[in-house]
Amino acid sequence: MYGPTPSSPPRRNYEITPRTPSVSMSRRPTSSIKWNALTVHSQFGYYMKEGMRTSVEAILLVQEHNHPHILLLQIGNTFCKLPGGRLKPGENEIEGLKRKLTSKLGANSPALVPDWQIGECVAIWWRPNFETIMYPYCPPHITKPKECKKLFLVHLSEREYFAVPKNLKLLAVPLFELYDNVQRYGPVISTIPQQLSRFQFNMITT
């Protein structure tokens, strides 16, 4: 049985302009590399102060050549990530994701900021320890995981205006390129095609 029908508007319907670089994303995220002692110390300090880290990321669907694509932010020449980020302590997941999407893709003018329509959570990933690897489940022997990451399907209007920091690129990547491509995109992004397989896409052509 198919799940709810997400719409995939054409990629050409979205206007993208550059804006001031995002300082917080100017460096390669620690999730893409082996954590060093300084990173572990920082994560340990956060955990001891705030508890488990919760992050939220958005799956934004568009279509090109009648095939669904996912919008990804490219940092540098190789690393890609989903729009989103860490929630503030006690912050609501939906409101927090809207805040992160606005900070990553929203224009400086409030009138041009998209009305983010947050859909259902399609995946939950867990970081059991202070290390790079994440799992799509929490191992039974782990009673105090260090991070929980949730992926939400976000429904886009047929036309939107995005403002992307100059140090980033907004890419539309086809599902067939993501599929099982762990080496290029990592385990979280490369499994999105499987997570979306229960949906029947509504391809908007105009």
Image: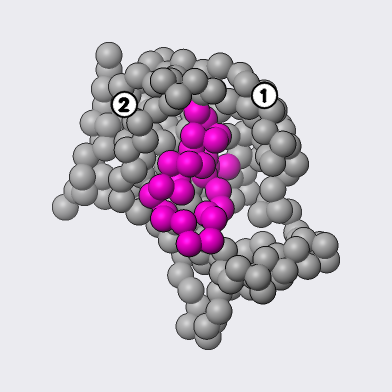
Above or below for 106 versus 85: above
Frontmost residue, 140 versus 163: 163
Frontmost residue, 193 versus 34: 34
Q: Which amino acid does label 2 sit on?
A: Ser
Frontmost residue, 145 versus 78: 145
Above or below for 51 versus 142: above
Above or below for 108 versus 129: above
Frontmost residue, 138 versus 17: 17
Q: Is residue 38 left or right of residue 193?
A: right
> Residue at left 16%, top 52%?
1
Magenta stretch in the rendered image = 81-106
| Quarter of the C terminus within the rendering | top left
> Residue at left 55%, top 48%?
85
Q: How crowded is mark 2: few (under 14 residues within 10 Å), some or many (20 or more)?
A: some
Quarter of the view holding residue 142: bottom right
Q: Where is residue 143 in the image (x, y as percent from the top left)?
A: 52, 83
Q: Tell me whether the residue at label 2 lies in contact with that at label 1, contact meaning CB atoms closer than 8 angstroms.
A: no
Quarter of the view holding residue 19: top right
Q: Mark 1 points at which residue?
A: 20
Q: Which of marks 2 and 1 is in front?
A: 1
Q: On residue 157, which mark appears? A: 2
Q: How crowded is mark 1: few (under 14 residues within 10 Å), some or many (20 or more)?
A: few
> Residue at left 21%, top 49%?
3
